[in-house]
Amino acid sequence: MENASTVLPLQKGIIYGPVASRRLGRSLGINLSPTGFKACSYNCVYCHYGWTNVKTCRMECLAQVLPSVAEVEVALGAALTGDVCPDYITFSGNGEPTLHPEFPELVEVVIRLRDKLAPQAKTCVLSNATALDRPQVVEALSKLDVRIMKLDAGTEETWLAVNRPARELGFDRLLEGLQRLKQWVLQAIFFQGSVTNAAPEQIEQWVKRLGELRPCAAQIYTVDRPAAHGGLERVPAGLLEEVAARASRATAVPVRVYSQGRMRDTGHAHHTAPGTEEDYAKEARS
C-alpha cells in the first residue's frame, strides 16, 4: 500500500527544474498534466507521485485543469530567458504528456522557443506509449530529438500487475504502437518484492519483446525513490548488469544500466565505455 508521507508531491506548475537527471543531464521539465490531482493512463506501482486519481486515456474532459498552449509558451519563454541553460527540455511531469489534447501544437511551440532561446538544448519526451494509436501524436513525437518510451513488461500479465493501465488499453495495442514509432529509446524499471517484474521468466519475456521491437537503445534501472506501492525493493546493480548484457547479446540493441545515479554501457560491440549525453542524443536520432 501507499505510504502517503514518503511519495513525492505533484509538480505544482508547468515548468520545473532544471533537475539533475542521470540520463539527460540538466533537464528542464514541462508538466502538461493537472497539478491538483494525478491523472494518467497508467497507475504504476512504482510511481514516485503515488497512485493515479483519474485513470484515463482521454484528457479532453479535463481541459479546464490542463495548461493551455498559450500558458505553456509564456512559462517556457520566461524560464529560457532567465539563467536556465538546460541540456534537455523534457515533456514529463505528473502524468502522460502525450494525452494532452493539444500535444502536437505544444511540441511546435517548444521547438520554436528552443530554437530561439536555447539552441544548445535537445527536446525530449518521457512517455508510457499509450497514445501511439493517434497519428497526430506519432507525427509530433517524430519532431523531437529524443523519444523515450516505457516498457516494463514482456507479457500482458506482468504489464497489468505493474502498470495497471486504463481499462480501454490493451497490451497488443501498446506493442503495435511501439512498432509504428521510429528511432526511439526503450526504458524499463525493474524491481522485486510483493510485486515484481524481475523474476527470470519475466526477464526472459522482456528480452524477447526488446528483440521484436528493436528500438535504437534501451535504458534499465531500478527503484530509488518512494513508490506508490510500499512493498517494492531494489534490484541489485549486478543483476541489472546481467540483464543488460544478456539483452544486448540476444538482440544487438545497446542497453544502458543506470544505477545509483551512474550510467554504464553493456553488451554491445561499439559501446565499450560510457557514452556522453551528446553521444546518446546522436544515437537516439540515428
Image: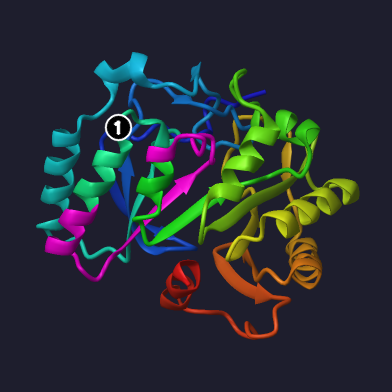
Q: Is residue 96 left or right of residue 100?
A: right
Residue denoted by label 1? 12
As for residue 126 lying within the magenta part, the answer is yes
Residue 203 visible in the current orientation: yes
Pinpoint residue 161: horizontal percent, then vertical percent: 74, 29
Residue 115, percent across and down? 18, 63
Q: Quadrant of residue 58?
A: top left
Vertically, is 171 above or below 139? Answer: above
Figure quadrant of the N terminus: top right
Nearer the observer, 259 or 209: 209
Tell me how the rendering is colored. rainbow
Which of the two residues, 160 or 199, is positioned nearer the viewer here?
Answer: 160
Badge 1: few (under 14), some or many (20 or more) residues near its Cα, within 10 Å?
some
Q: Is 143 above or below relative to 61? A: below
In the picture, measured across the screen, residue 70 lies left or right of residue 100, that is left
Residue that extends furthest to the top in the rendered view of this protein: 61
Residue type at mark 1: give it: Lys
Give SS at disc 1: loop
Magenta part of the protein: which range? 111-136
What percent of the width, then of the height, locates residue 139? 38, 47
Whether 227 is among the magenta residues is no
Residue at horizontal 50%, vertical 54%?
Answer: 148
